[in-house]
Amino acid sequence: MTLGTDLGGTDPTATATDPTATASTETVGTDVAVGSAPDSGTGTATATGTGTGTGTGTGTGTGETGDTAGAGDEAEAEAEADGTGPTRRRASAPIRRTVATVAVTLVVALVSAGWATAKVRLGDAREGLAETQATLAAQQETLAVAERRNELTAAGIGQVQADIDTAVAERSVLDGLVASTEAEIAAVEASQAETATAQALVAAHSADMMACFAGVSGAVRANRDGDDGASADALGSAAGACGRTLAYATGARFPYDFPDPFVLPAGGAYFGYSTNSGAGDIQVVRSSNLTDWELVGNALPALPGWAEAGSTWAPAVLAREGGYVVYYTVREASSQLQCISRGVSTRPTGPFLDDSAGPLMCQRELGGSIDPSPFVDADGRAYLLWKAEGMGGPAQTIWSQELTADGLALTGQPHALISADRAFEQGVVEAPSLVRTDGRYHLVYAAANWNSRRYATAVAGCAGPSGPCTKPEGGRLLSSGPRLAGPGGVEVFRGHDGGLWAAFHAFSEPNVGYPASRYLYLARVRVDGDRLVIDAST
Amino acid sequence: MAATACLALGALAVRDWTATLDATDRTRAQTTEARVVLARTEGDLAAALESMDTADETLAAEAAALSARQAERAEAQGTADATRLWLSALQAQLASATTELEASTGRVTMLQTCLAGAAEALNQAAARDTAGAAATIRDIEGACAEAGVEM
């Protein structure tokens, strides 16, 4: 900014042009352009300034630089702008003074106004800055608070999640505890059930037990009196009760002689058949739960004409459309050999009618045939298995042959499945029972002398109902134990619950050997890998 | 003299004016800068507040989940306690039943020993071996007495 001043005389009328004159303007408050003409001529000088603004200033020519106005003197300004044609103007001193004063005043006023305005604006700016800074500080404080709260919240979330993990872990532990406890409860309840069963068994037969002891006591007293006859009579009267007591003590399901049992599930019930004994040629018992059995009676009231009474053994029943077929062993009168016959009935309890003119199967050249057992394969075809006696001839052998659809005749050819060739079998294989589980065929059979503690139950694996069959190493399933002797005559059947069961007979220790009774026992059957297991405690 | 004074005064005024203008410029620049920082701070604050809302929601959800898990845990604890209690009761019952059964079984075992002899005597009697049956009875008399059977 160039501020030109002429504090000396002024000739407003003087004009001069100074091409070198410069003027600058600045817009501060009011725009003021002051031109200077350092070397001006006379007259009015018009200065043209360049700067950020443009302005036209009223210059005052100075006639003589440095000629300051003298007080009271009439200044004479003489300006020679270019030295050619000078114009001289004279003005009166008061006027010039006044003009100067006004100009100065004006300048001062303008400067003051601009200065004041600048001050005001500076104040405003500072106030705005302070306000902004205050707002900023407040916001920053709020931000800090928010961030701190976020940190705390995040920490809280972490803590809550940790608590959740803890609660979940504890719950898992508790669930495991509950599961293990429930397993314990189940085991305890199973034990309770077994205990209750045992207690019920003991309690249910206390009457027999007391009757037995009463008879024995009577016998002892008679013996003391030297009355052997009375002693024997007392024992005889207690024989039934004592037998039942002994049988139930070993877990027998039916406390009477019931050898070579066969169980048929039919009509929601179970029907048991056995070798001839006190109830007839084919004894029949019935149960709804496999635990409690009641005697039905004799299922075969009459034998066919070619048969001889007194040796009807090992019956087995096959359900066919419209009725039931019983297969049983009976003595052929003409040959005195045991052969297999069959009878029919519309009810599982019989009576079965055998109208045959001769045996269904009798391998006379092999010493006869006994122990028939039917088997129905997955395709519905039925087979009959039996044992060739082999007395005095070839080794005892178990055979099978397909049955006709009605079950009354055999069809096709017989197939030899297994023969007695193991030491423990002692030359005897008999009482076959074939069962199929998961595509595997298991041939359960009895071995050794039936009338001894050596009698046992074994198993062989078969490719099908017609064989071939293979005996595994150590294939015995049941052997004599401290309570039961000679467990055999096994027949495997499927219960109404879908599970496999084994019905078998055994002597009850210490009464082993005929005429002691062979009682009916039942046990669960399961498959362990490819092996059949009978869960029986002998 | 006056002119000089005025000139000096004017120079001072101009210098002050200039300084004022410079200060104003600086102040405005600072204000602008502060406003930039303020804007950024406000952005950060908005983000922080949004995060806070989210965190609050998360916290509320987690707290609800915790409450649920703790309720489940408490329920499991209750179930476990009840189950253990039930097990204890059953074990007590079983112990009692087992004791009772053992007593019964023990008696049955003793009675079976007695009965074994009786059975033999029965077989002998059935075979008309009266003397043998009597001898057998004499043999088992002690065992039967031990079993608690009054002969």
Image (tube, coloured by chain):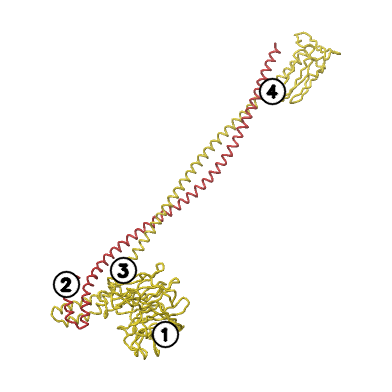
Chain colours: A yellow, B red
Q: Which residue is mark 4?
A: A113
Q: Chain of mark 3?
A: A
Amino acid marked by disc 1? Thr
Callout 2 secondary element: helix
Amino acid marked by disc 2? Gly
Q: Where A22 sits versus A176, above or below?
A: above
Q: Position of residue A430 (x, y in %)?
A: 35, 78
Q: Chain of mark 1?
A: A
Callout 1 secondary element: loop
Callout 4 secondary element: helix
- Of residue A46 and residue A213, the one placed in the foreground of this image is A213
Q: Position of residue A17 (x, y in %)?
A: 82, 18
Most extreme residue toward the right is A85
Most extreme residue toward the front is A393
- Of residue A74 and residue A150, the one placed in the foreground of this image is A150
Viewport quadrant of the C terminus of chain A: bottom left
Q: Where A195 sits versus A258, above or below?
A: above
Marks 1 and 2, how far apart at CA: 55 Å
Amino acid marked by disc 4? Ala
Q: Which residue is mark 2?
A: B142
Discs 3 and 2 share one subunit: no
Q: Which residue is mark 1?
A: A346
Callout 3 secondary element: helix
